[in-house]
Image: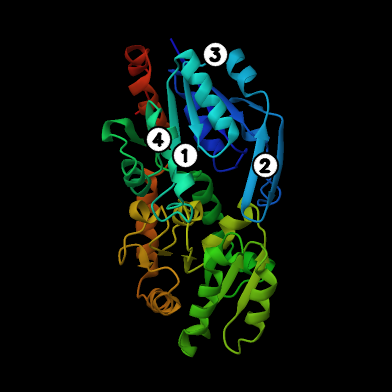
């Protein structure tokens, strides 16, 4: 007998679809995903790959508002959706939506276990804000379990006095197979891809929003500090868009050595091509709960240079083994790491290690973590155990 699970998630993000598909395939799970909106066009330009969705879902009516980084998302119909599906467990992606608190109330009234799914870490820019932390503590205290993305978010959950036996890791994942296949195809026709996308022969790659808090100005400063011999050989490519782009391009035009390219927003197919031909991904973020571009790059066989505040680093990037880990807001240290990677005698060795390690963070592994957490608090635990994924 299957356990009915309602999973509440903000948007139909392309990197979540493979995870939810894997969870829906589990023989012990009857999954209904409740999206609070299809997308957030003010922050993301992702296409919505509805043709790849193999799970049952609905999108709630909603209204968005906000100024700058402060966003408000109001939904209606949460209670009706839960009443109609009548879940036996609820997984709630985050605590910071009104819908999350409505789901919490529904679970309490109907005596249905609620699990929080969080990625936050102690390095999150929102951590330390008294009101926010108090809200999160209240929310987590009433959850039957907490699903975390990795080691950093596990330690953060423990800081709220969540017992270890209530925490389960569902490792954050992307579609590794898609990126690996696409990267292999791009490398087999490298020259045509490089010409079509106007790429340097060698380059460091940044993927993400072009905003200050992602460390993009640190990266540009670090590139400018590289020895001329390296800049003449290795360029820098920014893939993404955002409010800092115009200023970054202005600064880049003043550089007399090296090639700096701005590709704008790229869909995942083009991202895989960019990863495939790069020397390394550079992720210089000032604050990031995880950083799924690191997963994507590693699936494509790239070394990674990342700041130590990125949530994924504790699980995915080992300093000196498959890349380098540096302090945030430290362009000099970042430049040193970039110089080391650019001059590494066998960069494919580092990339191969990345490809090996990212196998632990597959959609199937993530889904298995969800199943484990649901089993731990479900009254149907014994029936589910027989059908749990490996």
Image location (x, y in percent) of residue 60:
68, 28
Above or below, comparing residue 71 to residue 34 in the picture: below
Mark 2 = which residue? 39
Of pointers 3 and 1, the one earlier in the residue sequence:
3
Mark 4 = which residue? 147
Of pointers 3 and 2, the one earlier in the residue sequence:
2
Mark 1 = which residue? 135
Which mark is nearer the camera, 1 or 2? 1
Q: Secondary structure at mark 4?
A: strand
Estimate the spatial distance between the alpha carbons at disc 1 and disc 2, rounded to whole Å. Answer: 25 Å
Estimate the spatial distance between the alpha carbons at disc 3 and disc 1, rounded to whole Å. Answer: 26 Å
Image location (x, y in percent) of residue 30:
50, 18
Query: Badges 4 and 3: C-beta atoms under 8 Å apart?
Result: no
Image location (x, y in percent) of residue 47:
69, 45
**Position of residue 324 in the picture relative to residue 131 (left or right):** left
Quarter containing the C terminus: top left
């Amino acid at each position: 007998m299957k356990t009915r699970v309602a999973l509440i998630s903000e948007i139909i993000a392309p990197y979540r679809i493979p995870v939810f598909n894997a969870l829906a395939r589990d023989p012990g799970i009857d999954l209904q995903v409740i999206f609070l909106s299809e997308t957030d066009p003010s922050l993301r330009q992702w296409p919505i790959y509805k043709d790849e969705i193999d799970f049952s879902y609905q999108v709630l009516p909603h209204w968005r508002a906000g100024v700058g980084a402060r966003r408000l998302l109001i939904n209606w119909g949460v209670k009706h959706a839960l009443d109609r599906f009548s879940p036996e467990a609820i997984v709630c992606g985050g605590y910071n939506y009104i819908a999350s608190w409505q789901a919490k109330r529904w679970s309490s009234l109907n005596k249905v276990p609620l699990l929080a799914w969080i990625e936050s870490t102690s390095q999150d820019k929102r951590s330390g804000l008294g009101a926010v932390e108090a809200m999160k503590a209240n929310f987590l205290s009433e959850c039957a379990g907490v699903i975390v993305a990795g080691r950093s978010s596990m330690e953060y959950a423990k800081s709220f006095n969540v017992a270890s036996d209530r925490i389960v890791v569902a490792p954050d994942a992307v579609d590794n197979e898609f990126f690996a296949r696409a990267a292999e195809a791009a490398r087999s026709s490298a020259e045509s891809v490089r010409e079509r996308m106007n790429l340097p022969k060698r380059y460091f790659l940044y993927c993400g929003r072009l905003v200050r808090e992602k460390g993009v100005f640190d990266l540009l400063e670090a590139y400018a500090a590289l020895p001329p011999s390296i800049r003449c050989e290795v360029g820098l490519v920014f893939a993404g868009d955002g409010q800092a782009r115009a200023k970054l391009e202005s600064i880049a035009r003043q550089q007399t050595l090296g090639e700096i390219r701005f590709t704008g927003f790229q869909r995942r197919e083009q991202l895989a091509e960019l990863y495939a031909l790069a020397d390394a991904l550079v992720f210089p973020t000032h604050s990031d709960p995880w950083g799924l571009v690191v997963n994507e790059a590693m699936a494509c066989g790239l070394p990674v240079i990342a700041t130590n505040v990125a949530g994924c680093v504790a699980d995915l990037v080992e300093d000196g083994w498959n890349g380098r880990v540096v302090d945030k807001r430290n362009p000099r240290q970042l430049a040193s790491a970039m110089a080391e990677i650019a001059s590494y005698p066998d960069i494919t060795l580092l990339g191969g290690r990345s490809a090996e390690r990212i196998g632990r963070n597959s959609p199937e592994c993530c889904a298995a973590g969800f199943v484990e957490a649901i089993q731990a608090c479900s009254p149907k635990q014994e029936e589910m155990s027989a059908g749990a994924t490996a």
